[in-house]
Image (cartoon, rainbow, N blue to C red):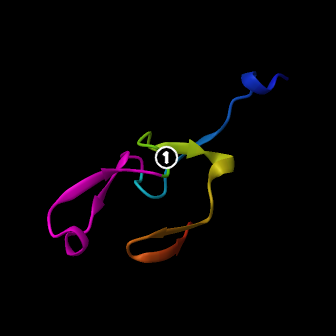
Amino acid sequence: MDESKKKTKKVICPVCKGNGYIRVPYRLAKEEVTAQCGVCESEGEINADQRDDLYVDADGIHKLQ
């Protein structure tokens, strides 16, 4: 099968949880700020093979379950 015709499985982005954006904590920015998700590039989904079971955010390192 041709590489371009293969369907890649998509999963919900673990960082933004499918929204495409994240909220910056008030304690870091001193104001209410929303930013685009850099992991999924604001799409809300990533390729399953691109997913990593560990990710880092403002609260620390987390493992996906």
Q: Residue furthest right?
A: 1
Q: Nearer the viewer, residue 54 or 34?
A: 34
Verify whether residue 22 appears in magenta: yes
Q: Quadrant of the N terminus?
A: top right
Horizontal side, residue 30 vs residue 1: left or right: left
Magenta residues? 18-38
Q: Residue furthest front?
A: 29
Q: Nearer the viewer, residue 56 or 29?
A: 29
- Which picture quadrant has residue 58? bottom left
Residue 28 vs 10, above or below: the answer is below
Coordinates of residue 45 in the picture (x, y in percent)? 50, 43
Neighbour tally class for label 1: few under 14, some 14-19, many 20 plus, Cα within 10 Å: many
Label total for image: 1
Q: Nearer the viewer, residue 31 or 21?
A: 31
Verify whether residue 33 appears in magenta: yes
Q: Residue furthest left?
A: 31
Q: Nearer the viewer, residue 22 or 48?
A: 22
Instruction: Name which residue type carries label 1.
Output: Cys
Horizontal side, residue 25 vs residue 46: left or right: left
Q: Which residue is mark 1?
A: 40
Horizontal side, residue 64 vs residue 36: left or right: right
- Which picture quadrant has residue 42? top left
- The residue tagged with tag 1: helix, strand or loop? loop
| Residue name at image x 25 percent, y 72 percent | 28
Coordinates of residue 25 in the picture (x, y in percent)? 25, 68
| Residue name at image x 62 percent, y 65 percent | 53
Q: Quadrant of the C terminus?
A: bottom right
| Residue name at image x 14 percent, y 64 percent | 31
| Residue name at image x 28 percent, y 59 percent | 23
